[in-house]
Image: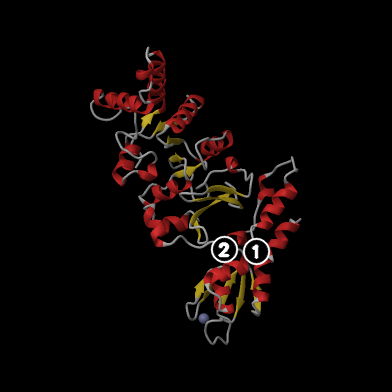
């Protein structure tokens, strides 16, 4: 039986078209009509009813739902967004979440939002893509969007198996939030929808780092939407791949989570740890292309990495005075890992090249 809430949402975009006095016919997921932009006698224009994207095959008129509203009602873009917000707004998802919050028999399918919830967002502008050194192709592949009202990234949170939309993570320099409140991001991984089964998983903290990795030729990025990685997320990793490279942030939270995963997965499967070497960046998104390539090809086996990490921890706690204890974990770990590589001749002999 079709979920009544989902059925109600699927008519959202149809209602918008009716309000714009567009005479359309439904074909699959599309509403087909005469193009509002040129003198069209045979319908050559269509609107996707899931996400509001529209396109005319005759004159090339195309864009988002907001751009259509602006065109038809002669609004500017901001006015069109406000007009749409009143009709498609996020309040529907919030209301739905509150209504379902008490449902203890949680199943991922119940979290599904309609794709039309994304209709207010746009494709990221070129300057945003450039600032993170990601390409339009990679952004499109990972379904990355942009909130033009706040100037923030929209990173969809989707079901790892059927790609249903559950919500999204929104972020910029000042803002970080997950929507809707309580979305079970720990039940999925960003990037699961495009991951090619059997290839190496590069586990990163930030979804945008998956996109950055893809832009420079590494398509195996998966992100848990933060530093902590749930059992379910690790189970998904285990199901889709035989080889995991942990590329969590090079800070104390990232290092401690890396150690936890190495410990828990010990002997279970092949895990290596990304080698930050002497690079300054704290995550793969901040590194140069060469640094990423070296970090992956020089990845350190989890056994050796964990042994070194534990030794550094013991060393730091055994130091007599406070001053020496303040020596950074990261610096000491870097020093010992690099020394190890040099003693072995060149790179860590137990690492594997995976390019
Ligand atoms: Zn047209």
Name the residue that disc number 1 marks.
Answer: 88
Q: Residue at x 52, y 43 (%)?
A: 225
User: Are discs 1 and 2 less than 8 Å apart at CB?
Assistant: yes
- Asked which secondary structure carries label 1, the reply is helix
- Asked which secondary structure carries label 2, the reply is loop
Q: Residue at x 72, y 62 (%)?
A: 8
Q: Earlier in the sequence, mark 1 or mark 2?
A: 1
Q: Residue at x 31, y 33 (%)?
A: 277
| Residue 267 location (% of width, % of height) | 47, 24
The answer to whether residue 150 is left or right of residue 300 is right
Image position of 17 with respect to 297: above or below: below
Label 2 within 8 A of ligand 1 by Cβ? no
The answer to whether residue 183 is left or right of residue 243 is right
Name the residue that disc number 2 marks.
Answer: 120
Image position of 220 with respect to 41: above or below: above
Q: Is there any visible trace of residue 168 in the rendered image? A: yes
| Residue 322 location (% of width, % of height) | 39, 17
From the viewer's side, name the closer residue of 115 and 148.
148
* On-image quarter of the C terminus: top left
Q: Residue at x 74, y 56 (%)?
A: 3
């Amino acid at each position: 039986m079709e979920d009544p809430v989902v059925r109600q949402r699927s008519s959202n975009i149809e209602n918008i078209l009716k309000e714009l006095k567009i005479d359309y016919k439904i074909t699959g997921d599309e509403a087909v009509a005469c193009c509002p932009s040129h003198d069209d006698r045979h319908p050559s224009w269509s609107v996707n009813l899931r996400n509001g994207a529209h396109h005319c095959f005759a004159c090339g008129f195309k864009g988002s739902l907001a751009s259509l509203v602006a065109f038809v009602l002669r609004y500017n873009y901001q006015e069109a967004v406000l007009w749409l917000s009143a009709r498609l707004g996020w309040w529907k998802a919030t209301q739905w979440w509150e209504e379902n919050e008490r449902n203890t028999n949680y199943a991922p399918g119940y979290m599904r939002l309609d794709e039309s919830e994304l209709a207010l967002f746009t494709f990221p502008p070129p300057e945003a893509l450039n600032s993170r050194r990601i390409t339009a192709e990679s952004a499109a592949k990972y379904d990355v969007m942009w909130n033009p009202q706040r100037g923030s990234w929209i990173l969809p949170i989707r079901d790892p198996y059927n790609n249903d939309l559950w919500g999204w993570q929104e972020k910029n320099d000042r803002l970080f939030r997950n929507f809707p409140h309580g979305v079970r991001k720990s039940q999925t991984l960003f990037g699961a929808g495009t991951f090619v089964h059997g290839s190496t998983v590069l586990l990163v903290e930030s979804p945008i780092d998956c996109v950055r990795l893809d832009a420079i030729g590494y398509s195996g990025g998966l992100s848990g939407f933060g530093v902590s990685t749930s059992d379910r997320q690790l189970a998904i990793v285990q199901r889709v791949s035989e080889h995991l490279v942990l590329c969590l942030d090079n800070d104390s939270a990232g290092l401690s989570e890396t150690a936890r995963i190495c410990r828990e997965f010990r002997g279970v499967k092949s895990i290596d740890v990304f080698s930050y070497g002497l690079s300054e960046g704290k995550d793969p998104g901040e590194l140069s292309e060469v640094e990423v390539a070296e970090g992956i090809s020089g990845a350190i086996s989890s056994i050796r990495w964990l042994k070194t990490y534990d030794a550094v921890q013991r060393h730091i706690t055994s130091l007599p005075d406070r001053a020496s204890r303040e020596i950074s974990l990261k610096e000491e770990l870097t020093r010992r890992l690099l020394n190890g590589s040099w003693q072995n001749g060149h790179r860590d002999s137990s690492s594997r090249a995976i390019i």
